[in-house]
């Protein structure tokens, strides 16, 4: 696998099983924003971003850090034409407005249309309103500035980010996100509902937190570890880390600032925890690869991915884009926060040092997890000579390739992960020929099938048996004997919430047949529940007809039409 150095044009010697080590020598150059007037800077940007501080540009080379040539920040002293541009809050001229841009001023102002210089770089070059963390318009303007700067200069390092964390509007957006998510209290026992009830308490709490961040007196608290069941049979448990409310708010604020920077670098084939990304889009990419002849699949499973991410290598990945020392120290403190766990036998608390991993439950953990595997996305999809397609959703991944290439790619994948202190679950990782067997991904079953009449091969996608079983278990839990004392309309409303959510997630591909069976199951369970509730001795099917269930009891009717997304 090879690529070209974006600065020098020389070929890079990185391969999927070999990582890059070392950095080029850093050169710097004054960008000269001091000469600009205050009213020429963008609104909503603070923290000394346009104060004329010196930025540095760095990159990676292979084989011991051989220099790839002199690199500069890409910005020079402001010309009269450049002086009219806005200043980004990261210490350089805002270059998102291109002279060749044909979009209107209103489109640029609202961020609804990307500049001409950024066209063709991905499915969505403008910063989306459908964000992982919802933000106000003023904060979203800051995100657009960061995103467009990162997109325009892939090797730029942002050095003035910490000052954005204690902005009043940004902290308020972060708190709103934490309140919306809810969750259990941390080690301090403080519940987020206390901030949602009283506006005065909320305002005072935010002001105190902003002051802690401004004075750099804020220190992360230990993480409370809890366990949840991974399956309905309650045979396996998953460990979750629950930070305090204060830590969750600050992590949300950091994610608001950092997400647009790394979003510009993330590969298009990564779909988890990203704006305007859905599981259906990931399945679209899988179908597209199958139609191109890549019918052999490496179904990869990472062992305890979130728990095994090495802190040192993860921080190196962060430092490729962020040179703000205060921000780096803050992320390091979150990663190394000790874990507090209650002993199941004695009930006593014990403190466990955290030497690796990012806790599941932390707000910023999904963003960091995506960042650590981003190099793998680019290595497989862009630099592999065999041109496979890797589709990744968090730690779930599929590598689709031509027949006969899967075994070699699986070996190289294992080598790449071991070099980064990760493990491949050998028991769950398998090589599948979709012409003979099916592969399960994101709750769907994917297979390469031949039509009975047309004799044409096509990708068959439908909800997996495990996903169907989970829905039936949830419906059974609602339509139990213990709920027969409740109003029928209220119980049916709960059933509708469950079925609508499941149908929204799995109304895709060849789901019509499965949906018909699931609808029949729900109707049958509801009939039996109503039959017992009202003590009827006959008329199970003749009285509780489909029309009565839909009309009188408001049972939701499933969509039984084709669900193609393209």
Image (tube, helix red, strand yellow):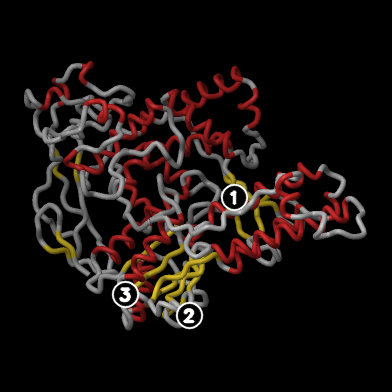
Q: Nearer the viewer, residue 142 or 561?
A: 561
**First reached walking from the N terminus: tag 3 or tag 2:** 3
Say which residue appears at 23% left-offset and 58% top-offset.
Answer: 22
Find the distance from the CA under tag 1 to the CA under tag 2. Answer: 29 Å
Q: Which mark is residue 336?
A: none
> Residue 337 appears at what percent x and percent y?
52, 46
Find the distance from the CA under tag 1 to the CA under tag 3. Answer: 33 Å
Q: Assign a secondary structure to mark 3.
A: loop
Find the distance from the CA under tag 3 to the CA under tag 2. Answer: 16 Å
Q: Which mark is residue 437?
A: 2
Instruction: Point out the image quarter for the N terminus.
Output: bottom left
Q: Assign a secondary structure to mark 2.
A: loop
Q: Residues within 10 Å of mark 1 (few under 14, many from 20)?
A: few
Q: Nearer the viewer, residue 286 or 405?
A: 286
> Residue 44 appears at what percent x and percent y?
33, 24
In the image, residue 383 sits, relative to residue 223, either above or below, namely below
Q: Which mark is residue 501?
A: 1
Q: Nearer the viewer, residue 485 or 458?
A: 458
Residue 412 falls in image quadrant: bottom left
Q: Is residue 54 visible?
A: no
In the image: residue 434, left or right of residue 19: right
> Residue 95 appears at what percent x and percent y?
18, 34
Instruction: Point out the image quarter for the C terminus.
Output: bottom left
> Residue 215 appears at what percent x and percent y?
43, 26
**First reached walking from the N terminus: tag 1 or tag 2:** 2
Q: Residues within 10 Å of mark 3 (few under 14, many from 20)?
A: few
Which residue is under mark 3?
Answer: 293
Say which residue appears at 35% left-offset and 73% top-offset.
Answer: 415
């Amino acid at each position: 696998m090879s690529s070209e150095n974006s600065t020098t044009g020389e070929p890079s010697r990185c391969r999927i099983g070999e990582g890059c080590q070392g950095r080029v020598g850093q050169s710097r150059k004054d960008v000269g924003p001091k000469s600009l007037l205050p009213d020429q800077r963008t609104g909503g940007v603070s923290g000394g971003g346009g104060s004329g501080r010196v930025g540095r540009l760095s990159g990676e080379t292979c084989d011991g850090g051989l220099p790839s040539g002199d690199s500069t920040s890409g910005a020079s002293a402001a010309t009269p034409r450049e002086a009219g541009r806005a200043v980004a809050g990261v210490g350089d001229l805002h270059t998102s407005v291109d002279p060749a841009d044909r979009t209107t001023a209103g489109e640029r102002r609202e961020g609804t249309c990307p500049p001409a210089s950024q066209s063709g770089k991905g499915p969505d070059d403008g910063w989306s309103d459908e964000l992982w963390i919802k933000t106000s318009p003023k904060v979203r303007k800051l995100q657009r500035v960061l995103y467009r700067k990162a997109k325009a200069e892939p090797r730029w390092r942002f050095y003035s980010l910490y000052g954005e964390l204690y902005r009043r509007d940004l902290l308020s957006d972060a708190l709103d996100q934490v309140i919306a998510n809810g969750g259990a209290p941390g080690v301090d026992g403080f519940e987020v509902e206390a901030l949602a009830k009283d506006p005065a308490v909320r305002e005072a709490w935010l002001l105190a937190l902003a002051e802690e961040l401004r004075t750099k007196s804020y220190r992360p608290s230990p993480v409370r570890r809890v366990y949840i069941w991974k399956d309905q049979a309650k045979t396996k448990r998953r460990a979750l880390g629950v930070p305090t409310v204060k830590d969750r708010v600050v992590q949300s604020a950091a994610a608001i600032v950092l997400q647009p920077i790394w979003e510009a670098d993330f590969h298009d084939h990564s779909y988890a925890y990203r704006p305007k990304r859905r599981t259906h889009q990931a399945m679209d990419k899988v179908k597209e690869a199958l139609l191109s002849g890549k019918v052999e699949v490496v179904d990869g499973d990472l062992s305890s991915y979130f728990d095994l991410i090495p802190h040192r290598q993860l921080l190196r990945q962060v430092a490729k884009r962020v040179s703000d020392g205060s921000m780096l120290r803050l992320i390091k403190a979150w990663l190394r926060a000790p874990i507090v766990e209650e002993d199941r036998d004695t009930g006593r608390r014990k403190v466990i040092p955290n030497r690796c991993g990012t806790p599941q439950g932390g707000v910023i953990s999904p963003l960091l997890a995506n960042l650590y595997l981003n190099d793998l996305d680019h290595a497989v999809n862009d630099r592999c000579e065999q041109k496979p397609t890797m589709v990744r959703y968090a730690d779930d991944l599929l590598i689709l390739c031509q027949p006969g290439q899967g075994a070699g790619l699986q070996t190289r994948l294992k080598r790449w992960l071991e070099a980064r202190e990760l493990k491949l679950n050998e028991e769950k990782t398998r090589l599948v020929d979709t012409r003979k067997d099916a592969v399960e991904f994101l709750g769907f079953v994917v297979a390469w099938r031949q039509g009975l009449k047309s004799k044409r091969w096509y990708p068959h996608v439908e909800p997996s048996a495990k996903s169907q079983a989970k829905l039936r278990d949830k419906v059974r839990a609602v339509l139990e004997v213990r709920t027969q004392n409740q109003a029928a309309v209220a119980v049916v409303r709960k059933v509708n919430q469950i079925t609508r959510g499941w149908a929204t997630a799995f109304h895709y591909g060849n789901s019509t047949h499965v949906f018909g069976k699931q609808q029949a199951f729900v109707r049958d369970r509801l009939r039996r529940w109503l039959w017992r509730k009202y003590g009827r001795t006959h008329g199970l099917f003749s009285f509780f007809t489909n029309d009565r269930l839909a009309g009188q009891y408001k049972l939701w009717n499933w969509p039984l039409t084709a669900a193609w997304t393209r």
